[in-house]
Amino acid sequence: MTAATIPLRVGNTQLQVPIIHCVETTEAVVHSVNAKLAAIEEASDRIDSHRFALQAAVHFASELAQLRLSMEEDDRALIHTLDQLAGSIEHLVASLDDLCERI
């Protein structure tokens, strides 16, 4: 099955961009790419398209790696919290069992 696409301008090129979650998210991603491309263009006196593409690729790959690391840290913190919660629930259940046995 082919992913749905929408026509959007990336840099100075009209592309068929795969829809990411929804049209609004896709447009926001393309806006972010265009903003980064503009920043790279402003930082250079001349345009070296190969270097330009590499800088943009490294920027977005780095951002993706940072997001993945952050998500992994969040996942570890959530697992730790859930383990603590499970321990508390086990303790509560054991206390209730003891109370029920006394009644």
Image (cartoon, grey):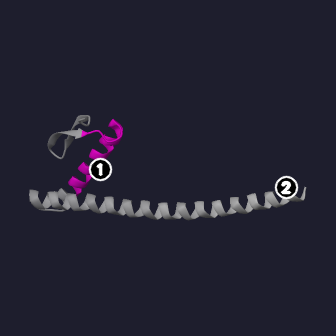
Write the start and end of the magenta stretch as one range.
Answer: 18-39
The amino acid type of the residue labelled 1 equals: Ser
Residue 47 seen by the camera: no
* Alpha carbons under labels 1 and 2: distance apart: 60 Å
Name the residue: 15% across, 62% down.
44
Residue 17 seen by the camera: yes
Query: Which residue position is annotated with label 1?
Result: 32
Q: Which image quadrant is residue 93 in? A: bottom right
Most foreground residue, 26 or 1 = 1
Q: Residue furthest right?
A: 103
* Picture coordinates of residue 77, whole percent (x, y): 52, 64
* Picture coordinates of residue 13, whole percent (x, y): 14, 42
In the image, 19: left or right of 93?
left
Most foreground residue, 80 or 9 = 80
Most foreground residue, 31 or 7 = 7
Most foreground residue, 61 or 103 = 103
Q: Nearer the N terminus, badge 1 or badge 2?
A: 1
